[in-house]
Amino acid sequence: MFAPDDTIVAVATPPGRGAIGVVRLSGPRTQHILRELLTGAAAAPRVARVARVLVLDAGGRESSDDAVALFFAAPQSYTGEDVAEISAHGNPLLLEGIVRAAMRAGARLAEPGEFTLRAFLNGKRDLPQAEAVADLIDAATPAQARAAADQLHGTLTARIGAIDAELFDLLARLEASLDFPDEGYHFVEPAAIVGTLDGIIGRIDTLLADAARGRMLREGVTVVIAGRPNVGKSSLFNALLGTDRAIVTDVPGTTRDLVAERVDIGGLAVTLVDTAGARPTVDPIEREGVARSAQARAASSLVLVILDQSEELSDDDRHVLDATRERPRLIVKNKSDRPDRCDTSDLAASVVSVSARSGDGLAALREAIAGALTTAEPLSDTPAITNMRHVALLDDARTAISKARTAAQAAAPEEFIAADLQQARERLDEIVGRRTSDDVLRHIFERFCIGK
């Protein structure tokens, strides 16, 4: 998919201006290119060197910038190849000029994720660790960052490796029995096979049971704020965000389209969606907004149905309540600083009272949202598995192991049991990257940023 024998270059820091920007090189010509770019003596491995670095503008004119260069000799580097990192002033024009000069000296521009791909191909990272690099970069909440860092340190790999080691040992004994068919030797009995596989299935089930929570943590969730006009949906939206993002007025129907922002609630990356007030209308624009609100509610993980505590339930309120009856929802009684005239005693749903204006009750609402989304299971413990690719392959492995267990229980020939166990090991190998197609690798690494 990528040429692994040339030298690549890219800006490794985010786009935009900053105090420092980093240009990264990796490949066999790294030292040669450094000599072309930097003034003075060659950089010693792992020793920071202050130098002037060549900058080449789009017209081919040369200039220079103050920089600090670090060289990492293979294989003691991020990619396992010779690697250099040049830290210069963080002006995009300067950094692009350094990249341009490196390309003139023999490097090519890196593809997205190519540095980490080379780390994987050179055995510096397995595939879950490589995927965790992108997850760590993309993390929007501390909990997401903890989960990614946990996988980057190899905890999932270790658990998969322990399961695979047990399967390998069992498979080796089965194959030893197959090597002596005439002598009738059996290095493992069916009952022992069943017992071992029961233990392995239990460990896989533990991982899979945590997968829904892990996927929610990694991918985030959508929470839709719904209700009739002027119950305070946009005010509550702004209060949960901590900023004035949605327009708030006393005019009904101010919000006519979906307004969405990301916010951290209980460790989850929640996409909070403010919607148009639900009511009959002849205005074609508002009517389209109401229709989009209904679509958003249907696709959400949780609906916050906002009611005005100071008023009795209206027909429009009851319409929203009826429309969300089958959806996961919380009833939020806004304007808790006013007398309570809104009777919700007959609603089969959790009710939280808040004041979007004063902030009273917002902490309890955040807690209720987190509890509803995680089915009261806390996110304080880092989930072991968060990636749907891993979940699907682990589920396939469990299916193959279950077939082997059934065969062993029925005293089936050992070659049938061994075939199922070999299939299970192949699925585990795909998780850690020992058996992964180029198409899968391309799909995984193309979502990385350039420079990583």
Image (spheres, rainbow, N blue to C red):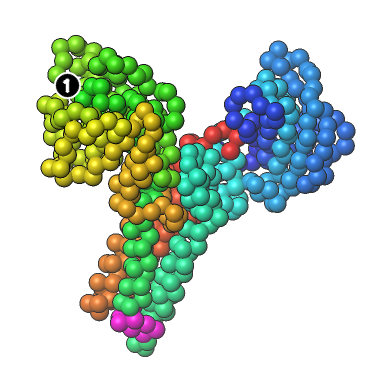
Along the line of sight, the residue nearer the viewer: 398 or 94 = 94
Q: Which residues are magenta?
A: 186-193
Q: Which residue is pictured at 32% across the width and 73% down the height?
A: 198
Reply above or below: 232 against 146.
above
Q: Give the amino acid type for the residue marked by disc 1 in the picture.
A: Arg
Residue 190 forms part of the magenta stretch: yes
- How many numbered circles are shown? 1
x, y percent for residue 373: 32, 46
Q: Which residue is mark 1?
A: 279
Residue 388 visible within the image: no
Reply above or below: 60 against 272.
above
Q: Which residue is pictured at 34% across the width and 19% down the height?
A: 248
Q: Quadrant of residue 378?
A: bottom left
Residue 145 forms part of the magenta stretch: no
| Left or right placement of residue 223 versus residue 450 in this view | left
| Left or right placement of residue 384 versus residue 39 in this view | left
Decide: few, some or many residues near mark 1? Use Cα within 10 Å; few <14, some 14-19, many ≥20.
some
Along the line of sight, the residue nearer the viewer: 48 or 122 = 48
The outermost residue toward the right is: 40
